[in-house]
Image (cartoon, rainbow, N blue to C red):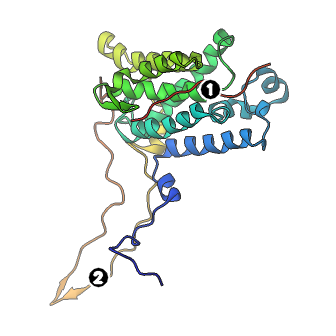
Amino acid sequence: MPARIGGMGDQPSGPEVWFKALPLVTRFWFGGAMVTTLAGNLGIISIDKLVFLWEPLKDNFEVWRLITPFLYMGKFDIGTLFSLYFIVEYSKRYESSSGYNTGAGGGTADYIFAMLFAIVMIFISYPFVAGFLMPIFGRNLTYFVLYIWTKRYPTVQVSLWGFPIPALWLPFALLALNTFIGGSIADIVHGIVIGHLYYFLVDVVPLMYGKDYLHTPQFLIDYFGVGVFVPQAPLPPPPQQQTTHGLSDLSAPGRANPPQDPAAGMRRRGGGYNWGGSGQALGSN
């Protein structure tokens, strides 16, 4: 048996542990994006089967086309790698922190609702901008998430190629960078516009006009609860009662999850085609 030095072997580590530690939505989105993008680029699945096309969806009932355009990130290039990085980095930040509260404390249920809002708005707006966009929406959704995170935490310092900037300016810095290098910006602009619409409806309208138009459905709140969803671990068996000098040890195991936030309803405020990805979104923090 190999020796463990300094206790380093006591805790499991590696890609699997890192992946399982991601928040729920981020984990499924990143995992699905990796599998779909690899399958398309390696020829396991035809890219024509992954993009959004209305006629096959309507005539042949190819319903997967409602999902795969948000998972296929484009051909292998630096822009695709950075898009996958943005999924992990900013989806994880938004989901694991307090995002915009539309009824579930800003956690997983609210994040799923925000994603559904973005997906519906992308489909609704696509016929009007189809001449400018490719029928793959992974980067659109990625920049939606990045934008609403920066609006939620505008003063957080992030790094773009080593240059610190306030988070509020990050989407526009990336947009300018893509413009400078001649990359595609239509999908970035599309995601930012939908992100701004979401921000306006959940943050500006209630504050300025006293109206709430977006509410997380109750079934999402009932299932995922308030805050970040953590699958409940099974409770350990109760300890056997022990008696010492006639006194019973009445200790009981603690709860696996804390109780729900009683103020869940209160809003928190903050601040043909070339099917491959054609732009490079460069930046990291």
Q: In percent of the image, x 54 and y 33: which residue is there?
A: 83
Q: Nearer the viewer, residue 224 or 249?
A: 224
Q: Residue furthest left?
A: 245
Q: Quadrant of residue 29?
A: top right
The quadrant in which residue 57 appears is top right
Badge 2 marks a residue whose secondary structure is: loop
| Image label count | 2
Mark 1: give few (<14), some (14-19) or many (20+) Cα within 10 Å: many
Image location of residue 222, percent across then percent down? 46, 42
Q: In percent of the image, x 41 and y 72: which residue is there?
A: 9
Viewed as shown, does residue 173 lie left or right of 240?
Answer: right
Residue of label 1: 137
40 above or below 203?
below
Query: In front here: 34 or 56?
Result: 34
Residue corresponding to mark 2: 241
Question: Within the image, what quadrant is residue 28 found in?
Answer: top right
Binning the other alpha carbons within 10 Å of mark 2 as few (below 14), some (14 to 19) or many (20 upward) gives few
Q: CA distance from mark 2 to mark 1?
A: 58 Å
Location of residue 186 with respect to 3 vertically, above or below? above
